[in-house]
Image (cartoon, helix red, strand yellow):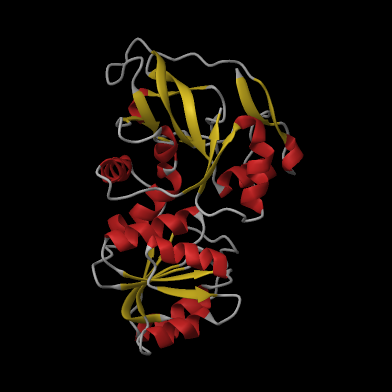
Amino acid sequence: MKAALITKHGDIENVIVGDYPTPEAGENEVRVKVEAVALNHLDIFVRRGIPGRTLELPHISGGDITGVVDEIGSNVTNVKPGDRVLIDPAIPGHGALGEDLTGGLAEYISVPASNCLPLPDEISFEKGAALPIAYGTAWRMLITKGKLQANETIVILGASGGVGNAAVLIAKLAGANVIVAAGSEEKLQKLKELGADHLINYNEVDFGKEVWMLTNKQGADVIVDYTGKATWPKSILATKKGGRILTCGATTGFDAVTDLRYVWTREITIQGSNGWEQKDLETLLDLVKKGKLDPIIDQVLPIEDIQKAHQLIEQREIFGKIIIKP
C-alpha cells in the first residue's frame, strides 16, 4: 500500500511517500480503508524524534483517522465491512496511533475494533478526522475537567492553533466570554469570526496587562495555557481570585516559573488535563452531527503533498486543521 514514511528522524525531506506492507486484521481488530487524516504538531515532533522514545523506522505517523471498515477479525461484532468509522487514537496499554504505534497516513490501517466509533453520514470524513487529538483535548480540558461555565471569562493562549481553535469554539458553545491571544492581526480577525469577544496581539502588547485591563483589574476566571515556560508567569498574574488555569502541555518548555504567592493569596486552581476519553469523542461527534460544532479545516491535501503539509505546520501558516487524503 501507499504510505507517508518517516525514513529517519530529522528534517522534512525524511518523510516520503512509498510502499509499505498492507496490514491484516487480527481476531479482535478491523482493517480500515483510510479516507482522511488530520495532521498535528505531534506529527512534526515524531518526525524530528521525541527524546527518550525509540521507533522502528520507517514509521507511519498520523493519529486522527477516519475511514471505511474493509475487513474484520473473527471476534469482532461491533462493526462490519462498509461501516464509516472514526478511530480513537489512544490504544489502551499500548500508546497512541502515529506516536507510539503505526499511524494512519497510509491507504489502510488495522486497529482494535473497540477503538472504532460510528461516523454518522452527516459528518464528512474530513470533519471527523479533525476531532480526536485537537478537539478531544480541548473538550476534556475546558468542559470535562475545567468545568467552564456560561458567562465566565476565559483567556485562550495560542488560540490560532488546532487545540486553540477548538477551545474557542467550545468556549463559545459553553456561553463564555472569550479573550484570545495570537501573534498576527490576520489570525486575530479569523478568531473574531469564530466568535472571540476580545483580541490580543501578544507581539504588540503584554497579554497579561491587557487581560487585567479587559477584566476591570479583576483577572480572568479561566486561563488556558499550554504554552508553558514563556507565558506561565503572566498567566498566574492574569488570573482572578478563585480562578483557574487549565493546561494540557508546554510547547515552549515545561520548566515554568510559578509565583506561589499569587496561587495562595488568590486561591488559584491549576488544573491539568491529558488527552481525552472515548466518551469525549462521542460527545463531540454528536455536537457536530447536530450542527452545534463545526471543526475548522484550513486545507485538504493529497498524501503526495505530505512534505508541504509538514512545512505549513512548522511555519505556522495555517488556521485550523490540515487534512491528508491517502
- In this rendering, would 24 be left or right of 44? left
Query: At 50% from the left edge and 35% from the top edge, which residue is drawn?
Result: 37
Q: Nearer the viewer, residue 112 or 126?
A: 126
Residue 94, horizontal then vertical, whole percent:
47, 33
Q: Position of residue 122 (x, y in %)?
A: 30, 34
Identify the residue at image location x=39%, y=38%: 128
Indicate the position of residue 228 as horizontal and vertical percent values.
53, 66
Q: Quadrant of the C terminus?
A: top right
In the rendered view, does 187 fall on the left or right side of 237?
Answer: right
Q: Quadrant of residue 237?
A: bottom left
Residue found 42% across the figure and 85% down from its top:
212
Side (left or right) of 227 relative to 122: right
| Depth order, front residue of 204/231 | 204
Q: Find residue 313 and report its horizontal and vertical position in percent.
A: 61, 50
Q: Residue furthest top?
A: 74
Q: Is residue 49 visible?
A: no
Q: Residue at x 60, y 64 (%)?
A: 252
